[in-house]
Amino acid sequence: MAETPTRSAARSAGEAAPARARRSRGPRTPRPGPGLPQPPDTAGAEAPDTAVPAAPDTAGTLVGFYRQMLLVRRFEERAARAYTEAKIGGYCHLNLGEEATVVGLMAALRPTDYLFTNYREHGYALAKGIGADRVMAELYGRSTGVSKGWGGSMHLFDAEARLLGGYGIVGGQVPLAAGAALAVSYKGGDDVVMCQMGDGTTAIGGFHEALNIAALWDLPAVFVVVNNGLGMGTAVERSAAEPELWKRGAAYRMASARVDGTDVVAVRDAARLAVERARSESRPYLLEAVSPRLKGHSVVDPARYRSKEEKDALKDADPVARTARRLADAGILSPEDRDRIDAEVTAEVEAAAAFADASPQPDVSTLFDYTYATPVAGEQRRLPADPVFRS
Amino acid sequence: MTEILMPRLSDTMEEGVVSSWQKRPGDEVRAGDVLCDIETDKAVMEYEAYEDGVLDRILVAEGETAAIGAPIAVIAPAGGVPAPDPAPAPARAPVPEPESEPESAPLAVRRPDGARPPSSPLARRLARDHGVDLAALTGSGPGGRIVRADIEAAIRAEASAVPAAPEPVRTRAQDDPDVEAVPLNRFRKVAARRLTESKRDAPHFYLNREVDAGALAAFRATLNEVLAPARVSVNDLVVKAVATALREHPEVNVSYTEDALLFHGRVHVGVAVAVPDGLVVPVVRDADRKSVSRIGAETRELAVRAREGRLGAQDMSGGTFSVSNLGMFGVGSFSAVINPPEAAILAVGAVRDEPVVRDGRVVPGKRMAVTLSVDHRACDGATAAKFLARLAELLENPLLIVA
């Protein structure tokens, strides 16, 4: 267990004010008082074992994971191609290489759990249960898209699927996720908020503020840092004084762990532990999944900061291929099944691209219709060419 | 057959340059293989194939530019006999290549019919308020964008039709009557970009050498007598000598890339040619295997086409070494900028009458200065010096050039 559940300062009741309104949480484990010995910091555990005893995965579950990973892979490859064909505008960040992390994390959530992500979120939307057609249509900026064509690649949003947004500002989603967890806690219920971010985000002020308040107020939030080793092109070691990012949880006395993000089952188990702890005890968690990305930061990044050797090594460590190999070795996935699944997801992605291509562009008159959920005083509905002041 | 189209690789990219092909026609291609490097306005990006097959044809040569969506190559199905030509490109109509467009009038806004010309919001508001038709204006802003000054100029122009209108105030540099802004033509744009790239990226060093050109001049005179009415120039002999020396010194016939040093198996010598509106470097292919007279004929033919603006991009690409000769203008010696991705360029000065020491006596003789500019990333001083020594030997013993 790479946990640091060392909250020693017991607080008197009523101090953690907002969390008190919680209604239907499970029993909370008492915290050690000031005089109690601290549990040892079992830091070396890079891959936490599953404290939640789970039934062994069936072949169907594992093949299902593989299928989802391959769907993310083929979807992102198709998105990259659509970008070169000028079908997709704006920014476009891909989950290529992070499929195991994406699928493992989402497998640990219930459909009613909330998800916040950064701008690298296509795969999360798919694994959260949103159709590839609606996600692709959003990338194409079409009105049939998840965000009705007005969000694009970085701003997928689907309240029904409880995907509360991809966010384009680094770290922008972290305080918002803490706020959503506060809302869950305030209203009651046992939903959990998961907040995904990249390694660079851990150097953003909002990361500290959100984790601090989440720990202070016992919010049911799981913060997930996907550490791909590079903040755009800057190595983690060059930007983080503590490059083992999961250790940052210690600053907030928050349980935290690091997991191999290329192993879908390990990620699912680690995430399940974090999520169920947040659910049953209403305590936040910091999970670090180490998973390289195969390509540049975004589709426009040639990744020249990587040597050819590094690129080749990445290809060899490809989690999708690795998962296929492991399933084949275990006798679960035959080559025929693998090809069939590939053909199926490829067809699904091609159909999504065709659907997106055939969908209409949103009407300009709807540009402001989805900006705010509630009326906002002084809201300006000014189009780019409109004068700043109307005479 | 699948057409490979010029990809859009950044949001601001409108056209791209194929900086190098990683596959050659006939090469097998697998999905995910890097087909070529595309230079965008921002960076050089690798472009990967989406499907398996065999690279059938390259439509846009290295160094050439194509608009987004224009076909740059054709991929044939793997293992299959080359099928008939592909059906016309998919629904997506290729944008016409910018090269086929005329270099149009100064700063004019090119736009499809009916489209609104690019303009700033302020300009649009001013135009609306003063009843100025944007479509009738020519923008002076970046990319032909109509800006406030253009609207104000239009308003003043209209007002000046009325007597006693105030004299327009010249506020912009472009209005300075002593300065004429001539838009950059294609050659100058390409040359500016490539030469800047060369000087910025390639650490140049220079080797100077004086060559005794007496025998060369005599040999040329003899050749011209024999070959008349055909003629060879000193430069043709230099090109042949360079090609011969390159064949013997393959370590100079190279290109530097980030990953590897590329040794070129063939010797293609570029010859810098001045044209009325710039500089072009047509390439004499396999110059080491051609006779001096053939090199001369080809060079003159290329130069004529260059001056008439009829050079195709394939005539100017693929060089492995370049020669620049300013001797005919009386230039004694100079240093040239390397033409990337080549590793070196030879600058040739005039053949001068000079006193020469021969057998301990000062006698009238002929001298020619050559300067070799070398990319130090690709080639070191001693290596280049050996090449230059052999080149000088060839030039001083011109029979060796044709031997």
Image (cartoon, coloured by chain):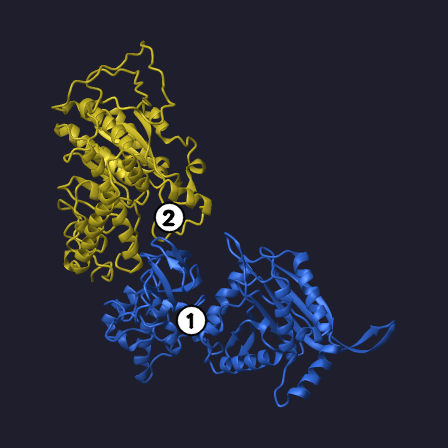
Chain colours: A yellow, B blue
SS under mark 2: loop
Residue position marked by numbered label 2 in the rendering: A296
Position of residue A312 relative to residue A185, above or below, is below
Picture quadrant where residue B54 is located:
bottom left
- Report the quarter where the C terminus of chain B lies: bottom right
Position of residue B128 relative to residue A326, above or below, is below
Could you tell me residue A115's position as x and y percent? 21, 37
Type of residue at label 2?
Gly
Could you tell me residue B101's position as x and y percent? 36, 76
What's the chain of the residue with tag 1?
B
Q: Residue at x 25, y 27 (%)?
A: A274
Q: Residue furthest right?
A: B360
Of residues A151 and B268, which is closer to you in this image?
B268
SS under mark 1: loop
- Report the quarter where the N terminus of chain B lies: bottom left
The answer to whether residue A166 is seen in the rendering is no
Residues at marks 2 and 1 on the same chain: no
Q: How crowded is the residue under tag 1: few (<14 C-alpha within 10 Å), some, or many (20+)?
A: few
Type of residue at label 1?
Arg
Position of residue A43 relative to residue A69, above or below, is above
Cα separation, mark 2 vs mark 1, equals 43 Å
Of residues A233 and B184, which is closer to you in this image?
A233
Residue position marked by numbered label 1 in the rendering: B172
Q: Where residue A170 is drawn, which disc sits there?
A: none
Left or right of B139 in this view: A144? left
Q: Are marks 2 and 1 in contact (CB under 8 Å)?
A: no
Q: How crowded is the residue under tag 2: few (<14 C-alpha within 10 Å), some, or many (20+)?
A: some
Picture quadrant where residue A366 is located:
bottom left
Picture quadrant where residue B227 is located:
bottom right
Could you tell me residue B102's position as x and y percent? 38, 78
Count of labels shown?
A: 2
Q: Residue furthest top?
A: A35
